[in-house]
Structure formats: structure tokens, C-alpha cells
Image (cartoon, coloured by chain):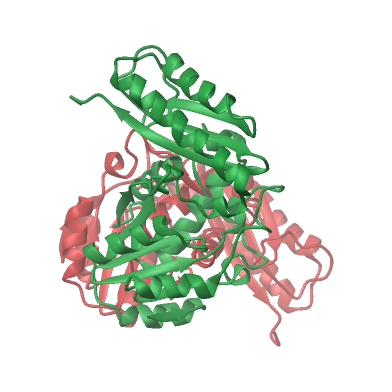
Chain colours: A green, B red
Amino acid sequence: MKTVETFDALQEALLRLKRPLGLVPTMGYLHKGHLSLVKRAKQDCASVVVSIFANPTQFAPGEDLENYPRDIDRDLGLLKGVGTNLVWIPSVKSMYPDDFQTWINVEGVSKPLEGRVRINHFRGVATIVSKLFNSVRPDKAYFGQKDAQQAVVIEQMNRDLNYPIEIVICPIIREPDGLAMSSRNSYLNERERHAALCLSRGLNTARDAFQKGEKHADKIREIVANVVNEEQLAELQYVSCAHPETLEELEGEIESCLLSMAVFIGRTRLIDNIVLLQPNT
Amino acid sequence: MKTVETFDALQEALLRLKRPLGLVPTMGYLHKGHLSLVKRAKQDCASVVVSIFANPTQFAPGEDLENYPRDIDRDLGLLKGVGTNLVWIPSVKSMYPDDFQTWINVEGVSKPLEGRVRINHFRGVATIVSKLFNSVRPDKAYFGQKDAQQAVVIEQMNRDLNYPIEIVICPIIREPDGLAMSSRNSYLNERERHAALCLSRGLNTARDAFQKGEKHADKIREIVANVVNEEQLAELQYVSCAHPETLEELEGEIESCLLSMAVFIGRTRLIDNIVLLQPNT
């Protein structure tokens, strides 16, 4: 496994990699969710490139950029263990030089949900992902369903900007008790870690009700909210029952939806989601 | 020379082209300026791809999109004559499907000059050029100095978005009497064609004064304005004496500048420019 930092070293290293080439963009502090992406890429591709870059432009002022967990040595060990061919760790200065001024906006699908509460978040995501795509020119790129709206934004950008790249969205990986894997779980103390189960519990409760015939979007959102509100350490920021592709909020009876939520557990902000589908659709 | 229309046909044709690959983006109705780009690309590259696409998103409402001249058969003959390997002619519908929503903004250098009078023009330019870059994945891309601000915007985007592409800017090609080649020259009637010489005459007069020691930005702009204003059919939209890289308008004594202008000749809007440089810089 080779590790490079500069753009030029990356270009040279890429010349030696066999195609098809898979790219797994990460912000580091890797967990089993990230590794599942690399493993899937290894199945599909002759070579796998992983980028590690905590992208500052997708954090709003006051968010957790400064505290975002980092452990490069551990990350490299994990990546080696799953057969990664090349790791790219660019510097912030090289990705955002002083005269940087180019931004990509995916206007429609960036607006609701996370976009409403995390100002410029998806502008930062779209811009950095485009930069990674351009730098690596992969055949396939892998992202997690955990960041469901991010997946929709990137798929839209990939289509709109004519990237000859196949976007592969991989399932959420969960802890045995249901908590969705996230680098931010490391912020949680023991009590908070327990409280954080209200996210997956809320989604599962709504899924069970949906499977038993509850089809009203309002009611489904209410079921999730009720589960979260029972948890003292939790504060629900939003729960959404939205069209899985357009991300428009749904009303009335639904056939399918992306059920997603953001919850503060103490000062830690967690997100989770599930896609609800009628068995016959 | 092969001609393709769809994205998939393009991808297949690209596999058969030898690298390095040069891309020459055009809006069609080709003239010697375009052909000079293709010839330069042929010198540098093993294969040359030319795109023909009158990009609707870089025209504002009321501009000349509907009347923009087209003659694909003539274009193809000219391109064949200079050794083009592949011509890509995408449809508007394929480049901008109904749910298209992704835009690229190069914020700083898009603002002055053309950006001030052509709303969203450079957003359209940056977005389509990025789409062409992603679709073709060239090693080098060729643009004309005629559209000086466009060249600066594209170079900035290319750096900011980490394209592994070398941008090559080629000199303005002029008619024997000095008029800069432009597809829009075809709009001019005989009287207007004569009047249009005031653009290059204004630039040349200013250049001569600069070379004889006139260094004041105000004075240089005034020289150009005076020449244009002497021409009855001409209406000066702007004349600018700007920093060649940042495009910030210059004041006081200058050492170098991009001297550029936009002039209406009747209903036809023409632009032209020259870079003024001290002999010792």
C-alpha cells in the first residue's frame, strides 16, 4: 500500500494502478462503515484508492471541524488490512490555496433536510467530491447510505456534470445494538452512547408500524419523534419522511420514503435513516 | 475523422484514441481562430477531440442564442481538413436534462468586465467546460485569448477543481484589416463590418501610446474610448484596463494590463483585447 500527499505524487502513483479503479473518499478516523466501502470496491475494481481529508468547507462555523477525530496511523493500518492500493492524504493548503474561489452547487437536492440546518454543507461536499473525482479519475466511487442526502447530492452532481463514474452507495453498517457507525460516535460518553440508541429505535419503530399498515407521513414522523422525545439526553433537530430521489417532504399516504433524522445527544449531533418501501414496490 | 453525438458513443470512441489527448471546445460556426486551436492541439497531442455545442446556459435572456450562427456540415469539413480525430456534437437535451441543477461558480474572476454585463455568463461557461472536461478527460485543452476573461475563469476553475489538465491559451487570430475573428462577425452588414474596425484601432492606438510612455490607466482607457466614440455606428459598453490575472480594474500608473472592451456595432456585440506589457517585464 502506497501513501501520497501531493497532487503530483498522486498522478504518478495513479499511472501504476490497474483499471478499473475504485475511489473511496473519507474524512479519516475510519470505522467498519468505511472499511465496508473499501471491501466492496476491492470486489468490483482492480485497484482501490482511498482519500483521507477532513474537508473544512463542509463544516459551518461553530460545527466540530476543530474537534473532528483524527488518527492517521490507525487509519493506515486498517486500510492496509483490507487491501487498499493507494491512500491520498492531501493538505488543506493544497486543496484550498489562498485564491481558491470555485464552488459547485447542486441546487435542488441540497436544499432540504441537512441543507436547511447545515449552511453551505453540500456546497462543500459537492466541491470536494468533484476535486477528488478530477484528481483520481476513478471508474467507480463508493459512498455510504448513512449520509443519505449526501449520496443523493453526489449522484445528481455526477449525472449533471457528466462524470463517467459509477456511484456505488453501500448500506449503513451498525453496531450490534443498532447504532449507526459514525466517526462522531467517539464524542459520546457512556450515558450518551446509551441514549444514542433512540435514533435507530425510532426508525425501527416507524418501520414496524409502516409494515403493519401505517402509511401516513405525518404519523410516521410522529412515531420517530415520540421515541426520541422519550430519551432525556436527546433533542430532535428534525425528522423527515421524504421522496427518496427528489428529497421533497411527503404528505398524506406514502408508498415509499427516505425516513431520516438528526438528533443532538448532548453536544453531539447524530444522523440516521432508513428507506421504507412497500413490499410489492 | 469520427463524429459522435451521445455520451456513450463518445466514451467508446475515446477508448480508441491515442494519448496525450487534446480537447478543443467550440460553439460551432468555425473560423480561423478555432482552426488555429486545433492545429496547435495537433502539434502537442497524439489525438484531438473537438466539441461543437452552442451552450444555452451562457446566454442571458435577450442575447443571441436563437440567432447564433450554425453550419455543422461546413464545420465538419473544416475540422477534417486540419486533422481532427473525433468531433462530439451533444444535444441540448442530453447536456441539460429536465432535472439539471448543478452549477459551477468561479466567484472572483467571473465578477468584473463581461460578468458585470452578462448575467450568469461565466456560471454557464464554467459549468459546460467542466462537463466537457469530465466527459472527455483530456490531457490538454485549448482556448482562445479572444475571450480573455473566459480564459482566466477556466484556468482558475481548472486549478481550483484539481483537473489534471493543461490549459493552453492561443493568440487572437485577426482578419488582415485587424478585426478579431468571431462567429458573431457574420451578423455585420458591410457598413458595420467597416465600423467594427474601431475595436482593434482603439486597442492599437492605446498600445502605441503605452509603448511611447503613456502609463496612466485612466488615460489608456480614454484613448480607446475616444477612438470608439469617433465611430458613429459604435456604442462602447465598457473599456477596462485590468490586472491580467485577478482582472481587478487598475488605477494610476501601470506596468502591465489586460486592455479589453465590449462594443455594440448596431445590434451586434463585439469584444476584443490586448495585453500591454512593459518591454522589460
Residue B146, how many percent across, how many down? 50, 63
Q: Residue furthest right?
A: B252
**Circle count:** 0
Residue B165 seen anywhere in this rendered image of the structure: no
> Horizontally, is B53 left or right of A119 in the view?
left
Residue A187, how many percent across, how many down? 62, 52
Q: Residue B243 or A85: which is nearer the viewer? A: A85
Seen at 63% across and 70% down, the residue is A93
Is B144 located above or below residue B92 in the figure?
A: below
> Horizontally, is B92 left or right of B4 in the view?
right
Residue A192, how many percent across, how many down? 61, 43
> Horizontally, is A8 left or right of B100 in the view?
right
Is B111 located above or below residue B15 in the figure?
A: above
> Horizontally, is A181 left or right of B215 in the view?
left
Seen at 68% across and 66% down, the residue is A98
Classify the position of the N terminus of chain B by image quarter.
bottom left
Seen at 64% across and 45% down, the residue is B116
